[in-house]
Image (cartoon, grey):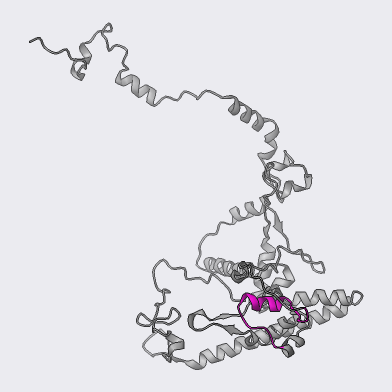
Amino acid sequence: MAPRVQTRVSNALLPYLTSSSSISSLPSSSQCLSRQFSVTAAPQTKLRRTMFEWFETEGAALKHHTPGETNYLTRVKPAGNPDAAATRPFPHNPNFISESVLSEDLRNEVYHRVVEQKKSLRAVSVQLGIDMKRIAAVVRLVELEKRQRQQGKQLALPYARAIHEMVPTTALAEPGERQEYHEPINDLPAHPLTGAQIFYPVSESRPFNRIEAGRVFSSAPALEHHEAQEISHPSDLAEKVIEDPSVIGWIGKGKDTRQILQPADVRIPHPQMVALDRDRIAHPNERRAVAERQAKRVERQDALEQERRDRAQARREKSLKSVSPETSRFEYRIQETVYTSETTGSDGRAPWATGRRYGVPHRDRTRGELKIPTRVDA
């Protein structure tokens, strides 16, 4: 039987094959290596040529930025409105706005008023036009920065200065001038109870306002007639809540207990600003009297909040027993706990209880957990 013709050639025969053989067109190993490490420039397409031409002509103005001004593409390609070049980076997306950041002086002023002057977050928010959550974040970050300076750690200050030169910033007003508001400070988040659509018939003789609407959303009974007559405007209810937060009713049983939904005048971060606008409308020619009344209102609110905090701290200290052994550098704080259905739940494993047996243990000593505070109850 004739031998089968081999269609493949082994590597051992490659050196003995001539150029006229059937595999002379295959690339050699040296050719493969030379092609693999080739540095030949890629062919220029029309779009690449246009891009580099734009970099050398019109786009050359964006190579170096002017300190204190933005360096957005809309500076050379304005999107309709020339004034929008400082806040809108993308010409084809006018809905995207570059928000401003706090300047270094304004950031230090926030820390000075909160930490050194002992002013409340609410008062500083109204004075500087900054949201209370941002004020709390600024205080935490400045405190962390001071701690790193004390530890001798290097800070990325050149990077921060460069960023502040290239993005919009809110500067601190000069003494005697009005401070520019950095952001809206009275935004009201959507409450989950208001997502339902309710058809609630009401008689014509019964007054129905936002207070009653909140009780309907909460499935709470209507106010008594004498209670409704005491509240002429929802802002009056806000003043009552500021004086005594316990006036807010509760509904439900057990774990389903929740507060009755309050009107927007009560739930906004700064309810006193509603009363300020009402005073301005009622007394347009008495600016000084309106300002003095507003200052007294803010001072009274801060005093009430400070008094509540002091009472809570006194109750906490009264329930704690501190023990400091002489041979130890630690201080042990012992608190007596009463195990009832309210503290541990009906099944004994309520999520707000402490301990592995009764609830969820604290994770403050778990590795990888965030130790710094992430929110401020204002």
Query: Given the current orientation, which residue lies at the most extreme left position?
Result: 1
Q: Which of the pair 278/120 is nearer the observer?
A: 278
Location of residue 182 (image quadrant): bottom right
Relative height, residue 266 to residue 8 (above, below): below
The quadrant the C terminus occupies is bottom right
Q: Is residue 142 magenta?
A: no
Relative height, residue 53 to residue 335 (above, below): above
The reply, left or right, for residue 66 in relation to residue 177 is left
Residue drawn 72% across the image and 67% down it: 129
Residue drawn 51% across the image and 93% down it: 318
Location of residue 36 (image quadrant): top left
Q: Is residue 220 magenta?
A: yes
Which segment did they paint magenta?
204-224
Q: Position of residue 193 (x, y in %)?
A: 60, 71
Query: Given the current orientation, which residue lies at the most extreme top position?
Result: 20
The quadrant the N terminus occupies is top left
The reply, left or right, for residue 12 in relation to residue 175 is left
